[in-house]
């Protein structure tokens, strides 16, 4: 969800680059001739947010449709893991430098406070919970991701000094899945159980994404996805989809403690495989939706009002929504709505909440001012 870093372009001529080197340049935003974002990551974020929205619109349809339940479980197995891996990848440079801490506060903490409060008001006015409490300790619906992202990024420097970061994160996730005492505060179960995907993203390099996008991987992903869909159809009436939310321990789901270990490892493995399949088919060129990738956090948080409102207001009570044609129509509408919410005009309207400047809230950092002057001087020299 983070923006791709934009670095100064080196003026010295460079030799012809290999495809892997070009991928590195693209991911860093240092392609030849001008600053740029890598369209692959923006495309991936947009397609992932569309899957998030469609998954939410399928949830009310799962009770009466095994197909809808299977699709729901299939999408939930990888849409957030894909988001989290990319978030980890773009958090690699995070440290405790003042300017980065400021961006963490204005880009994650402040939106959490504003949207958690807005969701509470929405529940009181539009929902069936007029006494919904105002609290920042119990994230509602979508805001758990902001809490998780805040915690994960703060711990980024620690993962750089750990000898085996991914296995340690995996161990933490497994232990969380068998620890009902963690409770619901700040949705720590999700923070801990999804942690391995973020840590994995921290240690990925651009060349790894280039390998995933190879033709052989795309071809191999077809039977893998087909097998996953068949497995989801088989599991739909036999398994609760709550395992895929990673917000409860095994005991809280009515299973023995050891099932938490088995299910956590199995589901994390499945999620990683399906994330690779998803990324393999993400286009690497600029498309009509590439520009929308920069606004996925807007679409993510704003569509929650409609996703929950549709339940509060009984939109899915109509019989036609539970027919095959109705399910397709609902899916198309959900994709169109979240697409609209990612567009630049919507982002301009809600930037005050999602990307507030808040210069008034922070002291000026002398070191950052010196770096800015140094960049201006170098820019003037090159000009």
Image (tube, grey):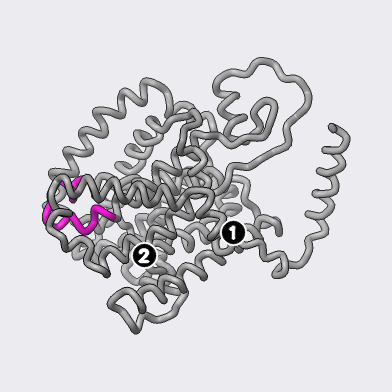
Is 197 a magenta residue?
no
Residue furthest front as drawn: 345
| Mark 2, residue position | 141
In the displayed structure image, the side of residue 284 where residue 219 appears, left or right: left
Q: Locate residue 41, reporting x and y percent.
A: 50, 38
Mark nearer the viewer, 2 or 1? 1
Which stretch appears magenta?
A: 57-71
Badge 2 crowding class, 10 Å Cα cut-off, few under 14, some 14 to 19, many 20 or more, is: some
Instruction: Give the Cα distance between marks 2 and 1.
Output: 21 Å
Q: Locate residue 148, reporting x and y percent.
A: 47, 60
Badge 1 crowding class, 10 Å Cα cut-off, few under 14, some 14 to 19, many 20 or more, is: some
* Secondary structure of the residue carrying numbered label 2: loop
Residue 355, numbered circle: 1
Is 59 a magenta residue?
yes
Quarter holding the C terminus?
top right
Q: Nearer the viewer, residue 21 or 6?
A: 6
Residue 224 visible to an observer of this rendering: yes
In the displayed structure image, the side of residue 90 where residue 117 appears, left or right: left
The residue shown at (28%, 77%) is 128
As drawn, 353 above or below 54: below
The residue shown at (22%, 33%) is 226
Q: Which secondary structure dominates the residues rendered in magenta?
A: helix
């Amino acid at each position: 969800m983070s923006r791709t870093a934009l670095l100064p372009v080196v003026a010295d001529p460079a030799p012809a680059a290999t495809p892997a080197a070009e991928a590195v340049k693209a991911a860093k935003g240092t392609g030849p001739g001008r600053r740029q974002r890598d369209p692959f990551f923006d495309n991936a974020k947009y397609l992932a947010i569309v899957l998030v929205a469609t998954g939410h619109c399928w949830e009310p349809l799962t009770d009466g449709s095994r197909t809808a339940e299977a699709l729901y479980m299939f999408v939930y197995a990888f849409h957030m893991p894909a988001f989290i891996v990319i978030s980890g990848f773009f958090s690699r440079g995070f440290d405790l430098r003042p300017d980065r801490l400021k961006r963490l506060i204005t880009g994650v903490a402040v939106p959490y406070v504003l949207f958690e409060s807005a969701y509470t008001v929405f529940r009181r006015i539009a929902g069936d919970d007029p006494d919904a409490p105002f609290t920042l300790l119990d994230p509602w619906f979508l805001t758990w991701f902001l809490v998780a992202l805040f915690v994960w990024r703060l711990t980024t420097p620690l993962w750089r000094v750990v000898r085996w970061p991914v296995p340690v994160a995996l161990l933490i996730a497994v232990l969380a899945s068998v620890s009902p005492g963690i409770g619901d505060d700040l949705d720590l179960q999700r923070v801990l159980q999804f942690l391995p995907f973020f840590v994995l993203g921290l240690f990925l390099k651009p060349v790894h994404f280039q390998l995933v996008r190879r033709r052989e991987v795309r071809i191999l992903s077809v039977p893998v996805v087909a097998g996953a869909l068949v497995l989801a159809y088989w599991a739909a009436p036999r398994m609760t989809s709550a395992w895929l939310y990673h917000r409860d321990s095994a005991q809280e789901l009515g299973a023995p403690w050891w099932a938490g270990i088995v299910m956590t490892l199995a589901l994390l493995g499945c999620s990683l495989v399906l994330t690779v399949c998803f990324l393999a088919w993400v286009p690497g060129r600029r498309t009509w939706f590439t520009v929308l990738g920069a606004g996925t956090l807007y679409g993510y948080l704003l569509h929650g009002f409609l996703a929950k409102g549709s339940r509060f207001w009984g939109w899915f009570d109509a019989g036609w929504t539970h027919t095959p044609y109705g399910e397709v129509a609902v899916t198309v509408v959900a994709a169109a709505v979240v697409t609209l919410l990612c567009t630049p005009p919507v982002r301009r309207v809600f930037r005050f909440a999602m990307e507030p400047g808040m210069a008034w809230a922070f002291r000026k950092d002398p070191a950052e001012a010196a770096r800015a002057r140094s960049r201006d001087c170098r820019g003037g020299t090159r000009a």
